Image (cartoon, rainbow, N blue to C red):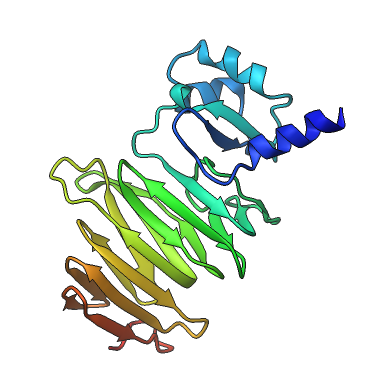
Amino acid sequence: MRKIIVITALLIFAPALRGGEDFVFFVREGDTAKTLTENYLVRPTAWERVVQYNYLLKPGNLIRVPVDLVRNEERAFLEFVSGKTSFLPAGGREWIPAAAGLILQNGDRVRTGPEGNAVIRTGLEDRAVLRSATEVVYQPTRGFLAGRTNRITIVEGTVIASTRKLEDREARFVLQAPGSELDLVGTELRIRVSPAGETRFEVLDGEITVKAGREKYTVPSEMGLLMSTPSGGEGDR
């Protein structure tokens, strides 16, 4: 029995998600087999296989689901985790250990410890690498004209983001920092937010436009921008 428990734990908290492995669901208040099947799985009968992987459907459980059973278009999930990386579900009070493959929902938070790292992937190729001592909030939106936006708000720490540049993008990818935000397409950059709210942008490839209040600043490749957030809430360059 002890060996079985150890093996199960290793499967749930594997450090990375590779082809053929599992997505992970956090069971939330109000979740049922019917709602999870309708919202995520490829067909109604897929739940029968999910049941074979898990024991109880109750809030707080992590459910392992084979990748081929999940509709992953527009999904945001943890592609990789290492070290001490934690997850706080929207409306929750307790941080729990994060797992590779964990699907994120609106308001979920991810936090890496002093030696932790994590990668959030949205859509096909957009990624946000969370370096150590970083906390972010996933806050997607959907508008009538703008469509879906995968928004990641950086509370504190360092994020390295890379996005693809294709005309057929299924969703926008936005990074938000105190007093400013970026709409990224075909760009690679590093953002560092200090505990005092100071934000440093470093463009590694491509070009970015930083919106801060009513102002916009264009930053070319291999250049940077330093912004502070005064008490009024809008960024100063």
Q: Residue 184 occupies which quadrant of the picture?
A: bottom left
Asked whether, in this view, residue 191 is left or right of residue 59, the answer is left
* Place of residue 26 in the rendered image (x, y in percent of width and height, measured from the top left): 61, 39
Q: Which percent across, then down, holds residue 229? A: 39, 85
Toward the right, the furthest residue is: 1
Q: Residue at x 16, y 40 (%)?
A: 168
Which is more toward the observer, 191 or 139?
A: 191
Residue at figure coordinates x 49%, y 13% from the top left? 44
Which residue occupies 65% across, 52% down?
A: 92
Q: Point out the image quarter for the C terminus.
A: bottom left
Front-most of residues 76 and 163: 163
**What percent of the width, then of the height, locates residue 58?**
71, 32
Is the residue 172 above or below the residue 4 in the image?
Answer: below
Say whether residue 128 is left or right of residue 24: left
Q: Can residue 185 be seen?
A: yes
Left or right, 34 with respect to 62, comes to left
Picture mark count: 0
Residue 9 lies, with reference to residue 155, above or below; the image says: above
Residue 29: tell me if it is visible.
no
The residue drawn where x is 40% and y is 48% is 121
Q: Position of residue 220 (x, y in %)?
A: 16, 75
**Image quarter of residue 22:** top right
In the image, residue 209 sits, relative to residue 235, either above or below, namely: above
Quarter that holds the N terminus: top right
**Residue lying furthest top in this view?**
45
In the image, residue 152 sits, relative to residue 20, either above or below, namely: below
**In the current view of this chain or complex, which residue is farthest to the front?**
3
